[in-house]
Image (tube, rainbow, N blue to C red):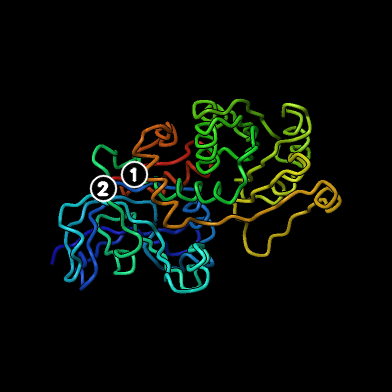
Amino acid sequence: MPTHRVLYLLGPEHVELRREPIPRPAAGEVLLRLDAATTCGTDLKVFKRGGHPTMLSTPCPFGHEMTGTLAAIGAGTPNWREGDAVVVANSASCGQCRFCRAGRENLCVNLLYLNGAFAEYLLVPEDFVRHSTYRRPDGLKPALAAMTEPLACVFHGLSACCLDDVTECIILGAGPIGLMFVAELAHRGIRVILGDLTPQRLEVGQLLGASDTVLVSGDRTDGDTLRAATEYDRGAQLVIEATGFPTAWSNSMEAVAPGGEVILFGGCTPGTTAELDTHRLHYSEITVKGVYHHRPATVQAALDRLTEGTLPLEHLLQERCDLDGIEGALGRMASRKILKAVVTT
């Protein structure tokens, strides 16, 4: 029986490359031959923590940003043919619950997750074939197409904002997601101030369109420092937190202008608490929103944007590796030496 290689997450900082039989798709399923996968900050968090409260439990296949070519088609799958190039999103909603009916599929009570992008082949279940598989346009490079999922999260985050009168935005965190926010907001003509601890990441932010960069210290003074970089020293109308550290959550409140909006995108570990200035929250009429994941509409919007080629996101892909090199790439991400790696087999 033909076999392929799959990277498994077994526990905190413990992965294992296994050889398994290549799956055969049942009715409604497809077999994906992976063309490219990309590492991300969530992968790093899951690797360090050994799991995720909703997305996976160990031991399990690892990786979720992917694109590939259909290698086999199960019966009853009329819309797809062998050889079709596709992007598969990493979640599938039920379409029936109250959240799905309201267009908030990311909060679906029956949301399913798909992991296993760090492999040679991946069996795509029927729900994902029906709801979460998209044609990869001709000419879109696989390495960029694999970043559809994180860019879809960015589009979802921006859909939660009121951008009509926003001319200036502060972004805390120059990781891959924060930098994607930079690129998209700059593309929309909004002045972006980017704060991060690493000078090299701020340089990438400038390549992606940041108007100003601030080397922050990681303590509670960063909010004041970032606010001072805004046009009138009163803060930005929109602040996006993309670090997942509670200090940055607190600093976001200090950096936002009166009447402004704070988007909390970086997820912290369960049970984490953050200090918020309730006086400022109340008397300055600040809106604070938590934002998570993506929706089918934002996956399509992200894929369309990547196809346009208007965002220079290739600057995020700072390393190429095979399946054997993923653990090393995650280590270099943890030490802030690289932003993302593209994995090919």
Give neighbour class at mark 1: few <14, some 14-19, many 20+ (Cα, 10 Å).
many
Where does label 2 land, which residue?
35
**Which residue is drawn at the image coordinates 17% and 57% (left, top)?**
71
Find residue 142 and report its image quarter: top left
Q: Secondary structure at mark 1?
A: helix
Q: Position of residue 182 (x, y in %)?
A: 54, 35
Q: Is residue 38 above or below residue 103?
A: above
> Could you tell me the amino acid type at mark 2?
Asp
> Could you tell me the amino acid type at mark 1?
Ala
**Which residue is drawn at the image coordinates 16% and 61% (left, top)?**
72
Depth check: give the residue in front, 140 or 62.
Answer: 140
Circles 1 and 2: CB atoms closer than 8 Å:
yes
Q: Position of residue 332 (x, y in %)?
A: 47, 41
Horizontal side, residue 283 vs residue 345: left or right: right
Q: How many angstroms separate mark 1 from mark 2 (CA)?
A: 10 Å
Where does label 1 land, which residue?
145
Horizontal side, residue 118 vs residue 94: left or right: left
